[in-house]
Amino acid sequence: MSKQSFHAKLSKEISYALRHAPWEYELELDQEGWVSIQQLLTSLQQSDQWTYVTAEDLQRMIELAEKKRYEINAGKIRAIYGHSVPMKILKKEAQPPKQLYHGSSPLSTISIKEKGLLPMARQYVHLAVDLDTAYSVGKRKNAQPIIWRVDTEKALAEGIKFYRGNEKVWLADEIPYQFLTVYHGT
């Protein structure tokens, strides 16, 4: 297996462990989603596929990743966003850019107009800082996605909280429809 393939598979395994099913790995995430690197490695190494995985492999996986999904600090690791675990992963409020974007299927339009953007199976609504990212996400749902523009200034003024996911993704608990418009270009 090539190093690139190894790190891609490791990233998928860790994503599942940290974002979706930590109990299957006997991991104890704290309220911000952090877990000891040693606890994660011990759990992974119980599988024949990951017997020899090291902390250096985790660091290299993060460095090689196209998207920043994980972070390491003080001997701990966490997934930055995308959690579907039952416990709420707490995020720190931050000041977002003036506009953010969300790509969705045209079939979601009626629901979004009625309820706004909701996290669905995730803990937070995911918002993109740029149109390319929003289109990329939206195209996973439909070849002709609808791009919603979020007026963060108005939303902030009304008490909506935003959290930084990474350099391309922002998070929110929900975005009411009153802060959304369909993006039609420039």
Image (tube, rainbow, N blue to C red):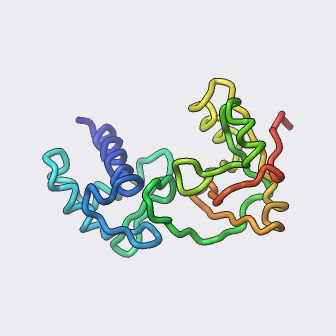
Within the image, what quadrant is residue 57 found in? bottom left
Residue 40 rendering spot, x and y as whole percentages: 27, 62
Tell me what residue is drawn at x 65 percent, y 70 percent. Answer: 93
Vertical arrangement, residue 147 with respect to residue 159, above or below:
above
Q: Residue furthest top?
A: 143
- Seen in the picture, residue 106 relative to 115 is either above or below; the reply is above
Question: For residue 173, what is the image quadrant?
Answer: bottom right
Q: Quadrant of the C terminus?
A: top right
On the picture, is 105 further left or further right than 82? right
In the image, taking residue 172 as reference, residue 59 lies left or right, namely: left
Number of marks present in the image shown: 0
- Name which residue lies at 66% across and 40% down: 134
Tell me if 128 is positioned left or right of 57 in this view: right
Q: Quadrant of residue 39?
A: bottom left
Q: Is residue 127 left or right of residue 158?
A: left
Q: Residue at x 19, y 49 (%)?
A: 50
Can residue 168 be seen here? no
Instruction: Write the residue at 40% across / 69% down.
Output: 34
Does the rendering let one see residue 44? yes
Residue 10 image position (x, y, % from top left):
31, 47
User: Where is residue 15 shown, x and y percent of the image?
Assistant: 38, 50
Residue 64 lies, in percent from the top left, at: 41, 48
